[in-house]
Image: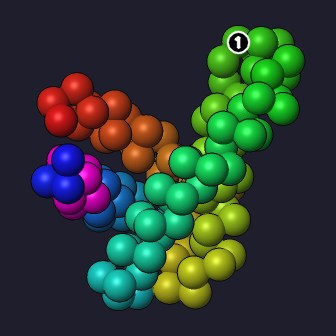
Amino acid sequence: MVQKFLIKAVLSVVTVIIADQLLASVMFKTIADVIVVTLFLAIANTFVKPVLSILAFPINVMTLGLLPLILNTLIVLFISGLVEGFITGGFVGAFLFSLIISIGTFIWEMFV
């Protein structure tokens, strides 16, 4: 169980680094910022996102399922405001960052 958690943690950090490398608008000052952002994303996705998803369910139905991407983007923008060494470059950068993170997480969740 601990081994699986550590594997997921490392894969999450790698996914964030890949997203950083793919997007010119997203920047981290240090590797510590990458780890902190990954930790904040994990906390937000565990506690905040489920509550927001339940509250926004009617809007999610009307937007045909696009709302989770917007929620992820807003969470990334919020985290970029908390972590000084994490720059998203605005809404579009945060949207693309959250999209890459979502795709990366989907891929590695199939194998772990």
Residue 77 image offset from top left, x and y in percent: 66, 62
Task: Give the quadrant of residue 94.
Answer: bottom right
Q: Is residue 106 left or right of residue 73?
A: left
Quadrant for the C terminus, please.
top left
Q: Hey, which residue is sitting farthest front in the picture?
A: 1
Residue 26 image offset from top left, x and y in percent: 47, 67
Residue 106 image offset from top left, x and y in percent: 34, 31
Residue occupied by mark 1: 64
Q: Nearer the viewer, residue 65 or 23?
A: 65
Magenta region: 4-10
Residue flagged by tag 1: what amino acid is it?
Answer: Leu
Task: Give the quadrant of residue 69.
Answer: top right
The residue depicted at 77 percent of the width and 29 percent of the height is 54
Q: Nearer the viewer, residue 112 or 22?
A: 112
Q: How is the image coloured?
A: rainbow
Does residue 7 appear in the picture of this structure?
A: no
The residue depicted at 77 percent of the width and 12 percent of the height is 61
The residue depicted at 59 percent of the width and 55 percent of the height is 44
Q: Nearer the viewer, residue 100 or 11?
A: 11
Residue 10 image offset from top left, x and y in percent: 21, 60
